[in-house]
Amino acid sequence: MSSRPIIAGVVFTLFASLASAQDAKTVIAGASKAMGADTLNTLEFSGSGADFAVGQAFSGSSPWPKFIDKTYTRQVDFRVPSSKMDRIRMQGENPPRGGGQQPVRGEQPQNQTIVVNANTPWVQQLEIWMLPQGFLRAAAAANATVKAQTIGGRKYNVVSFTGQNKAAVNGYINDQNMVDRVETWIDNPVLGDLKFEAAYSDYKDFGGVKFPMHIVQRQGDYPILDLAVSDVKPNAPVTIQAQGRAGGPPAAAAPTSPTPGAPSEKLADGVYLILGGYASLAVDFKDYIVVIEGATNDDRANAVIAESKRLIPNKPIRYVVNTHQHFDHSGGLRDFVAEGATVITHEAHKAYYEKIWSAPHTLNPDRLAMSPRKPAFETMTEKKVLTDGNHVIELHHLQGSGHNEGLLVAYLPKEKILVEADAFNPPADQNAPVLTPASPYNLNLVSNIKRLRLDVQTIIPIHYPANNRKVSIAELNRAVGDQGTK
Ligand SMILES: [Zn+2]
């Protein structure tokens, strides 16, 4: 075969990409002019709507749980660049359904400040670069390309550049020269390469600057923000101060351990508590290790794996018990799968994990992405008992929990220990005033303990109190007060 057609092909590709880059500059300039991006240095917009907690759904087939954003204001300084968001949130699901620290009591002020410097992760900058004018600014500074695309009968110029995380950032510019939608992909320890999308509609003119009156952000097919914009101030004076590290007392001295961030202590013969913000249990079965709740993210999972193997040497981790599919409890499960452990969870979660774990993890490959293997599951419905004749771990489904459809607790009858996730998250201060009415999730746990006749002395909350204190059943009983006896 002659080499001529190959050379012709190379030359053609070069011309095509030059043309695309030149066209992109024209398209970006046209949209920037139409949207007033050229003269826009700062921006303040406000409104109201709802936000939604990613990874905290009631089930694998329900949307992220909703919180009311009574007020929402975002300031942006494109020159720094920086951004500040202030909002007042309220409970959105009644009765509470799903996670995300429900129920929110009354009005909860929240804020987020981003001042971009050389070390600011790309994902944190996206609230700036995914805004319509932010996208055009970022695209103008990048080596963007453009292609024409028709979607649902509507014609778009799709402008693309590569984000700092190596994922494409695509902006869909409509025939009015408005940015209709921006999409990119970010890493999520559970969902892998996760599509993050912002859709803009109902554009209005504010002194030559066009801004959408409706913003919907989505991650993983479901909304994470749905905002009705009511006020826009182009070039408003903004004061966005970089925030130092959050204050507060230093963490209590923890037992030392060779695994950084995963201090451990022996609770009973062959039963070890691994702390470090989240709690895990490692149990020394005759031929293997059982880990109860090993996961939050990849780093945490690998620290728990290392500490479990140090505490219980020369045995494999055969099982990891997963309490439920919320991402702060399933974020490192894939690392246990890579370690060779079988995942024990409620049957409601198996199909969900099989589906989401087949997604690519190219942006931040974890252990399972680097050495793939088929995940092994053992599922349960209401009760499952793990035993080697000596140790006994009873797993029970919390019936009627609004937190998650397949929420499990682990009960160690000999040690009278109950391991639970999100059914009771003890307050930082055990003497803090009791909140009324009691959390429906706390009440549900109490009624399940009664139904199952569990003789609980010690509770191991997966979200362990920062002072690493022992949590007794008395703390739960105090939290529910009189309501627990009804
Ligand atoms: Zn949860």
Image (cartoon, rainbow, N blue to C red):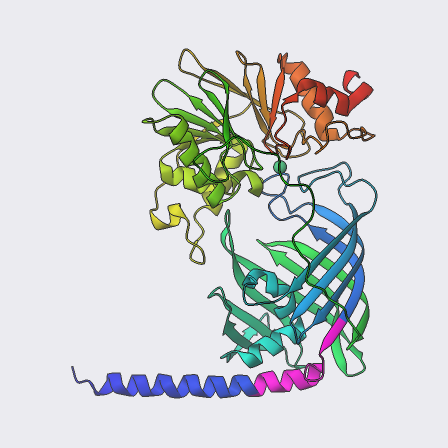
Q: Residue at x 51, y 41 (%)?
A: 352
- Comparing 450 with 249, the one in front is 249
Q: Quadrant of residue 37?
A: bottom right
75 part of magenta stretch:
no
Residue 386, percent across and down?
Answer: 45, 19
Residue range corresponding to the magenta coloring: 26-43
In this picture, residue 77 sits left or right of residue 323: right
Residue at figure coordinates x 61%, y 78% from the top left:
137
Q: Say whether residue 8 is left or right of residue 163.
A: left
The residue depicted at 58 percent of the width and 14 percent of the height is 416
Placement of the C terminus among the 4 image quadrants? top right
Residue 58 percent location from the top left of the image: 64, 39
**Would residue 329 be seen by someone viewing this image from the given angle?**
yes
**From what the image shows, is residue 62 above or below residue 434?**
below
- As rendered, which of 254 and 56 lies closer to the eye? 254
Q: Residue at x 53, y 41 (%)?
A: 296
- The percent position of residue 375, horizontal first and vertical second, equals 39, 38
Q: Nearer the viewer, residue 297 or 240?
A: 240
Q: Is residue 296 left or right of residue 307?
A: right
Q: Is residue 475 above or below residue 149?
A: above
Whether residue 29 is in magenta: the answer is: yes
Name the spot of residue 163 as percent of width and height, x first: 51, 68
